Image (cartoon, rainbow, N blue to C red):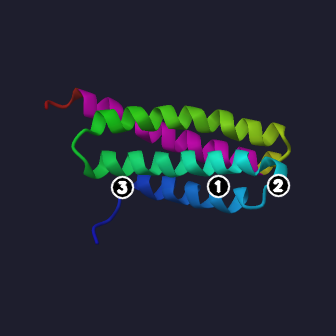
Amino acid sequence: MPEQPVILVKAYDLTLWMARKAERFRRPHRSVGDRIVNESFNLLEDLVSASYGRNRVASLDRAQHRINLLRFQLRMAKDLGLLNADSYGFASESLDEVGRMAGGWRKAASTQPA
């Protein structure tokens, strides 16, 4: 199997981390965890589509939108006491890194001839 792009590895690791964290959320807030995990999987799917699909720019635009949604969802989880400061910091930094990589990739993809 060929080596995967670094952004996919980082997004996969973040999605796995979020899934493990969310399964420990208290029952009244499980829906918050479910939304975070679903959005994380959707982000990963968009990045895979950008890596191996035809319409890279559209996939990266969707990924950027999902990154912004995840930022708010993670903040909500922190404010509800579902994530401690360290966990929130780790998730935010990881998500920011994926966002910077996706943004750079998006910029490069939009300047390439079709």
In the figure, residue 95 lies in which quadrant?
Answer: top right
Q: Range of the magenta residues?
A: 87-110
In the image, which disc is placed on residue 18?
1
The amino acid type of the residue labelled 1 equals: Met
Badge 1 element = helix
How far separated are the C-alphas under marks 2 and 1? Answer: 16 Å
Give me the residue at 72% from left, 45% from top: 32
Residue at x 69%, y 41% (from the top left corner): 74
Horizontal arrangement in the rendering, residue 104 relative to residue 114 (left or right): right
Q: Mark 2 points at which residue?
A: 27
Q: How far apart are marks 3 and 1 (CA)?
A: 20 Å
The numbered disc on residue 65 is none
Q: Is residue 39 above or below residue 25?
A: above
Q: Select label 2 or label 1 by which is in front.
A: 2
Of mark 2 and mark 1, the one earlier in the sequence is: 1
Q: In this view, does 35 lie above or below 10?
A: above
Label 3 secondary element: loop
Q: Which mark sits nearer the N-terminus, 2 or 3?
A: 3
Callout 3 amino acid:
Pro
- Most prominent secondary structure in the magenta stretch? helix
Q: Distance between the residues labelled 2 and 3?
A: 36 Å
Q: In which quarter of the image is the N terminus?
A: bottom left
